[in-house]
Image (cartoon, rainbow, N blue to C red):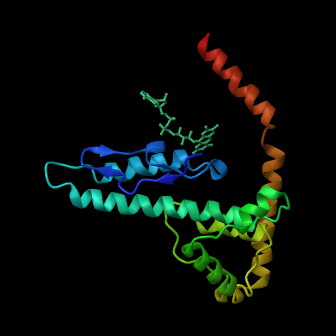
Amino acid sequence: MKVGRQTHFWKNNVLAIGLAAGFIEPLESSGLHLVQIGIERFLELLPGTGDTRPLQTAYNKEMAAVFDDVLNFVQLHYHLSQREEAFWKAARELPINAALQHRLRLYDESGTLDQLQPDAFPDTSYYFLLSGNNRLPKRPSALSLSADPERLKFVMQAILDQNKNALRDLPLHEEMLRLIHSQKLSKAS
Ligand SMILES: Cc1cc2nc3c(=O)[nH]c(=O)nc-3n(C[C@H](O)[C@H](O)[C@H](O)COP(=O)(O)OP(=O)(O)OC[C@H]3O[C@@H](n4cnc5c(N)ncnc54)[C@H](O)[C@@H]3O)c2cc1C
């Protein structure tokens, strides 16, 4: 795969969107999201008759930051993986970029994350990935230490109950597909 991103996503009257803008890799399926973000931001900046250079600069800077933060998140999967096959070992040994190194150091020390790009992956995604790979901080975040343990238990139980209800009430995947398919057929006929 040819991976990378443009430095000038918008240049004069040409805008690079989708694969023309860049490609990271398929692990987190971010391609369509990046297309959507690119379109939305361009519409916000849609040029009139004036000078488009400040618009281009803003667009290029923001899209580069979003792509780079998606890259950080994808890199983290390889960095944290504990799989022992040669591919994963080799991937783990590759250096990670400075922004991600800093993010991990901060997390290890404080359980918090530095400012993430709002249009890339949110903090919840990082916490799933980090804790799911047994990377826990040296201590919990200071604020969480002040939380009432009884209240936490209550909230966690409410989430468990919600999951149980969803499992009970939702149709099976196969049933859902059958339903969608039959509706399509009846519409067409
Ligand atoms: C198997 C697979 C699964 C994926 N799953 C996800 C997912 O779950 N979530 C997600 O966000 N992203 C996913 N992606 C990525 C996403 O599909 C792509 O990022 C997105 O389709 C790119 O859109 P695009 O318009 O830039 O390129 P494309 O969809 O590749 O469109 C480019 C078009 O240009 C045409 N073309 C090429 N050369 C020429 C030429 N010289 N003249 C005229 N036409 C030309 C091609 O025929 C094609 O129709 C997946 C990709 C693949 C392959």
- Horizontal side of 15 relative to 148 (left or right) equals left
* Residue at 37% in and 63% down: 61
Residue 31: x, y in percent? 54, 47
Rendered view: 72 above or below 185: below
* Identity of the residue drawn at 74% across and 68% down: 80
In the image, is 85 to the left or to the right of 56?
right
In this rendering, the answer to whether 10 lies above or below 178 is below
Q: Residue 102 at x, y = what percent?
A: 58, 79
| x, y percent for residue 131 | 76, 71
The residue under the point 61% across, 50% down is 25
Give the farthest residue toward the top. 189
Q: Pick the residue in front: 5 or 94.
A: 94
In the shown orientation, is residue 70 left or right of residue 182?
A: left
Residue 184 found in image quarter:
top right
Q: Is residue 112 left or right of residue 47?
A: right
Count of marks, rendered view: 0
| Nearer to me, 160 or 28 | 28
Residue nearest the viewer, comparing 85 with 101: 85
Residue at figure coordinates x 14%, y 48% from the top left: 49
Q: Picture coordinates of residue 154 (x, y %)?
A: 78, 73
Q: Quadrant of the C terminus?
A: top right
Give the residue furthest to the left: 49
Residue 5 can be seen, yes or no? yes
Q: Is residue 20 above or below residue 41?
A: above
Residue 129 seen in the figure = no
Q: Quadrant of the N terminus?
A: top right
